[in-house]
Image (tube, coloured by chain):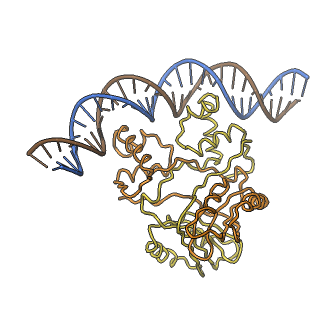
Chain colours: A orange, B yellow, C brown, D blue
Amino acid sequence: MTNEQEIVLDKTDLHILRLMQENARISNADLARELGMAPSGILERVKKLEQKNVIQQYTTRINPVALQQKLVAFIFMKAADGPGSEATSRELAKIPEVQEVHCIAGDDCYLIKIRTYDSASLMSLIRTYFSKIPNILSTRTTIVLETVKEQQQLVIPEK
Amino acid sequence: MTNEQEIVLDKTDLHILRLMQENARISNADLARELGMAPSGILERVKKLEQKNVIQQYTTRINPVALQQKLVAFIFMKAADGPGSEATSRELAKIPEVQEVHCIAGDDCYLIKIRTYDSASLMSLIRTYFSKIPNILSTRTTIVLETVKEQQQLVIPEK
DNA sequence: ATTTTAACAGAATTAAATTCATAAAATATT
DNA sequence: AATATTTTATGAATTTAATTCTGTTAAAAT
């Protein structure tokens, strides 16, 4: 049970989250200085935020261009999944190049975000993986020409 | 000039990136142990990766549910921007709740990803911000019912 | 009002970050 | 091919931070 019903975050927690969202490698000591608290107290709070699954991961944003991963595509997919079936989405989520899988309202079923090297590798990826997923009925692919903004950071309230 | 032409990453760099993408708060000492190298050498490489803008940010993934931010929407937008004009996209990118702005191929101009509390706050956000952006011609909004996967991690090759 | 629980501080210990001088390896130059 | 130059790595020394634990304070529950 990953219960998220009763999560209460106070001003201090939000402040910690704001600082760590901006820089996950901030030292515990610097956090303590910013908040005017003892390092031991901050450490305790951070550990609790991890335990409560408020903090899900510390990750490094890597420039995709540095790895020649220049193509982003969004794919709208219709699937023959029965209502509430998660079969197809689970298969899609397993593909490492697939960054996002959303169930969406409307005529289509899924919206998928994919990052690859180029259109050739997108094609080969589609052929390799999608052909093995039985319930896929149709896909519409939208190619990104240029990305102006791309981040997952949340707007964290003061209180 | 943020030049990204001549970025060469060797096996060691990729290994560092893989470990730090998975856990941005890994200690330099642990990195050194994993790679069988001296900590000072690792530190130098990490700093270089930062300088070269290969590493763009260390960030913390925070559970949006913990902040009651339950709604994700994708908006397709047509704009009356002249060819190559970045005016509209730049305005959109300034909105904190807007996580992504992409220029896309096809009939629409932009694809935008937004995260808010609920549909009411999405509406108010659209009214507040979009009304002030002159070139917007039309929008089509797709609401996410459920997110199965959401991450920005790259597939990092061995070599 | 009192008990219980949770949160914080401060000191002590252990561990890590950072710096720097030097050596080794890889590249470039002649 | 030999040498110079640059880049990359090491290891030791120093500074700084992480972590643990005990005692207090504050808050919540009874």
Residue drawn at (56%, 58%) of the image:
A151
Residue drawn at (51%, 79%) of the image:
B131
Q: Is residue B1 visible?
A: no
Residue drawn at (38%, 44%) of the image:
A45
- Using the image, determine if residue B30 lies above or below residue B107: above
Q: Residue furthest front?
A: A82
- Using the image, determine if residue A9 lies above or below residue C23: below
Measuring from the top left, give residue C5's x and y in whole percent. Answer: 27, 44
Q: Is residue A105 visible?
A: yes
Residue placed most toward the observer, B36 or A89: A89
User: In screen coordinates, is B75 left or right of B123?
Assistant: right
Q: Residue furthest bottom?
A: B137
Measuring from the top left, give residue D20's x and y in whole percent. Answer: 38, 30
Measuring from the top left, give residue B32's x and y in whole percent. Answer: 60, 31
Residue placed most toward the observer, A97 or A150: A97
Query: For residue B113, which quarter of the picture?
Result: bottom right
User: In screen coordinates, is B70 left or right of A106?
Assistant: left
Query: For residue A111, which quarter of the picture?
Result: bottom right
The C terminus of chain A is located in which quarter?
bottom left
- Using the image, determine if residue A8 lies above or below residue A144: above
Residue placed most toward the observer, A94 or B95: A94
Q: How many marks?
A: 0
Measuring from the top left, give residue B18's x and y in whole percent. Answer: 64, 43
- Using the image, determine if residue C13 lies above or below residue A93: above
